[in-house]
Every structure is written in C-alpha cells, then in structure tokens.
Image (cartoon, grey):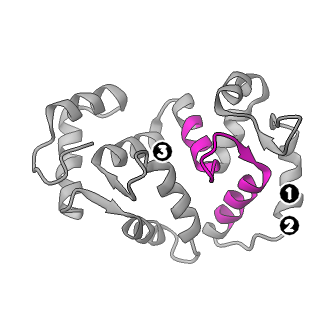
Amino acid sequence: MGNSKSSALSKELLEELKSNTKYGESELCTWYQSFLKECPTGKISKQQFEGIYASFFPNADPTEYARHVFRSFDTNADGTLDFKEYIVALHLTTGGKTLQKLEWAFALYDVDGNGTISKNEILKIVRNTVRTEGHRPANIRKNTRTSDSNMDYDSSSDRLRAFEKLKETAHTKRLASCFLRSAM
C-alpha cells in the first residue's frame, strides 16, 4: 500500500491520498514523517492500536471496541494499518463525506464481514461502545428497541440489508445519522 520503510512518501500514494482525503501534500508529508517516527516499520499492529485507544479512555476498557475499529480500518486484512489505511481512517473520523462515513460505519458493524448486519452484531458494537465510555452495558437490548424501527431489516431474517440497499434508503429513513452517531 504505502512505502513501509522509506522516509519519503511515494508519488503515487501521495497523489492518491491528496485526491481521496482532505489533506494537502505538505500535511501528508508531515503526517508520514510522524507516522514513521512512531512506527518505524511503517505499520501499526493491532496491539499498538489498542494501546493508543486505551490512552484516550483511561477510566474504561476500550479493548474490544478498539479491535472492531481496527478491523474496520484494516482494509487489506493483513493485521496491521499502513500509512494509507491510517490516513484514510484519520480523514474519515475527522471530516470525511457522509457516504464514506456510512461505508465505514457499516464495515464496523458488519463484524463477520458477510455484507449484512445482524441485530446481534449491532448489540455487540453498542455494548463495546458503552464499555469504552466507562459504563456498564446493562439493558442494552431494551434501549436499542427504539432504534429498530429506523432500521431496514430483511423481512426473511434478523439481518440488516446489504450496504447497497442501506445506502439507497439511508436518506429517507435517516439511517446514516443513526449509524454515524453510534459509531463515532
């Protein structure tokens, strides 16, 4: 994906990130140098990511949620985040477009990666989010029932429709804001 050990960002990756994120060339080069300073291998491991996440939530246990967030950003599923995945993640969480954020949130909730989201997957992420915030996940199922009416479940199962169907209905049912509020 990116140049994992070079101290210079490849021209191809630089151009790709400039066109797909809000960052300019000087910002990306500065981010890249900082990234290499913190991660000399050019990769962030799942354990490093969990440690970074834990530093933001010192009074809670964000480990499980951090694993889900890591999985959703590790787009090539190699168990690490390279610079490209890191910058795309940073862009998404700090100012990406609504559709990009919706795609990311769908990936976050699609725990098993099968292209649909079950109520159990939603509950798993919500429980982990609550733990990350330092609360106990009591009565989560009861509290999520109100959200069920906003979700577009397949009539033959307990699964949220595939992303393409979700994207089609997101505007009319305010699904995007529901997903994004709970994911961010």
Q: Give the mark nearest the N terminus, 3 or 2.
A: 3
Label 2 close to label 1 by CB (< 8 Å): yes
Q: Position of residue 117 (x, y in %)?
A: 71, 45
Q: Residue beneath label 1, please?
A: 143
Q: CA distance from mark 3 to mark 1?
A: 25 Å
Picture quadrant where residue 180 is located: top right
Q: Secondary structure at mark 1?
A: helix
Residue stretch in magenta: 102-130
- Quadrant position of the N terminus in the picture: top left
Nearer the observer, 12 or 61: 12
Residue 129 horizontal side relative to residue 37, left or right = right
Label 3 close to label 2 by CB (< 8 Å): no
Q: Amino acid at mark 1?
A: Asn
Predominant secondary structure, magenta span:
helix
Any part of residue 184 in sight = no
Is 48 part of what is drawn in magenta? Answer: no
Q: Secondary structure at mark 2?
A: loop
Q: Residue beneath label 3, please?
A: 93
Residue at the image point whose x is 65% and y is 65% from the top:
128
Q: Position of residue 90 (x, y in %)?
A: 40, 46
Residue at the image point whose x is 59% and y is 35% from the top:
102
Query: Which numbered tag is attached to residue 139?
Result: 2
Residue at the image point whose x is 40% and y is 67% from the top:
52
